[in-house]
Amino acid sequence: MFKNKSFGPQKNNKLKSQYRRYTRSKFGNFAFFVFLTLMGLFSVLPLIYCVITSLKPLEELLVFPPKFWVERPTFKNYEVLPSLLSSLRVPVSRYIFNSVFVALISTILHILAASGAAFTFSKSNLKHKKLLFAIVQFALLYNSYTLAIPQYLIFSKTNIIDSYWVYILPAIPSAMGCFLMKQYVDMSIPDALLEAAKIDGAGIIRIFIQIVMPLIKPAWLTLFLFSFRDMWSIIPGGTIFSEELKTLPQVMSSLTAGGIARSGSAMAATVILMIPPIVVFWCTQSNVMETMSSSGIKG
C-alpha cells in the first residue's frame, strides 16, 4: 500500500504553526505580566491610601487639593486613639470581646450549617432535593437590603432585638455558603468512599465529622474567611441599643465621626480593624484558590 512519506513532517509543521498561533510571544508575556501587576496595585490602592492617610499630620490633612503621599509621617493619629477610647462609658475591652465573640461564633455556626446542608443536597437520598437546592440558588438573587424589613419583623416578633442573637442568627444561613460547599462536595467526595464507610458500620454523623469535614477543609476555610470578614465589620442598624452589646467597628465609626480634623484618626482606626481579616486571609489564601478552582468559580 502506498505511503506518503511527506505526511508526517507536514502534520508536524501544521501542529507547530497552530501552537505558535495560540502562544504569546515573549513581549506578549511581558505585557500581560505588566498589566496584571498594574491591576493588582490598583486593587490595593485603597489599602495603601488608608495607611498613608493614617500617618499624615493635621496640616497635611487640611491641605487642598489633597495629596496622596505623606511628607512628614507621624504616629500621632494612633496615639490619640487611646485617649478617645478612654472617655467611653464602657471599657474598650468589652467592645473587643463583642467583636471577637460575634465573629467567631457566627462563623463557626455558619460553617457547620453550610457544610451540613451541602452534604445533604449532594450525597443524601432526600426527596425533591433538586427543587430545594434550586430554591437556595434563587435566594442568591436577594441582597441584605431586600431582607432588612422582613428580618426586623422577625426579630421583633421573637424578642431578640438588643441581644447577641441579632448578630448571630442572620449569619448562620447563607445561600452562597451552601452553594459553594455543595459544589466542592460534588467534586471532592466520591460516593464509593461513603459507601465503604457505611459498610464498616459508620453512621451518618460519624461520616460527616470524620470523613467529609476533613476532606472539604479548603472549602470551609474559605467560608471562614468570608464570614469572619463580614462579621468582624458588622454594624447593625436599629437592632442594638445597649452600649454593652456594641462591636468595635461601631464604636470606632462613632468616635472618628468628627469631620476632616479626625480623618487621620479614622484611618488609623480603619487600619487597626483591617489587621484581623488580613491575618485570616494570609493563613487561608491557598485554600481559597483551591476551593474556587475546584468549585468552578473563576475570579
Image (tube, rainbow, N blue to C red):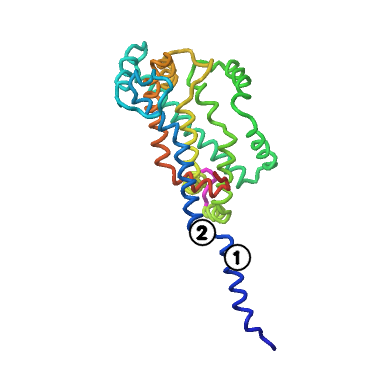
Residue 129 found in image quarter: top right
- Residue displayed at 52% across by 45% down: 208
Q: Main secondary structure of the magenta part?
A: loop
Type of the residue with mark 1: Gln
Q: Tell me the element at label 1.
A: helix
Residue 217 is at least partly visible in this image: no
Is 31 a magenta residue? no
Q: Nearer the viewer, residue 179 or 199?
A: 179
| Within-10-Å neighbours for mark 1: few <14, some 14–19, many 20+ | few
Type of the residue with mark 2: Ser
- Residue 22, percent from left and from top: 58, 60
Disc sitting over residue 18 in the figure = 1
- Residue displayed at 40% across by 26% down: 67
Magenta stretch, residue numbers: 201-205
Q: Earlier in the sequence, mark 2 or mark 1?
A: 1
List the single residue furthest toward the front. Answer: 65
Q: Mark 2 — residue? A: 25
| Within-10-Å neighbours for mark 2: few <14, some 14–19, many 20+ | few
Q: Nearer the viewer, residue 207 or 178?
A: 178
89 relative to 219, above or below: above
Residue 230 is at least partly visible in this image: yes
Question: Which part of the image, by quadrant, shows the C terminus?
Answer: top right
166 relative to 204, above or below: above
Q: Tell me the element at label 2.
A: loop
- Residue displayed at 57% across by 65% down: 19
- Residue 70, percent from left and from top: 35, 27
List the single residue furthest toward the bottom. Answer: 1
Q: Nearer the viewer, residue 255 or 112?
A: 255
Is 204 a magenta residue? yes
- Residue 61, percent from left and from top: 38, 20
- Residue 177, percent from left and from top: 55, 37
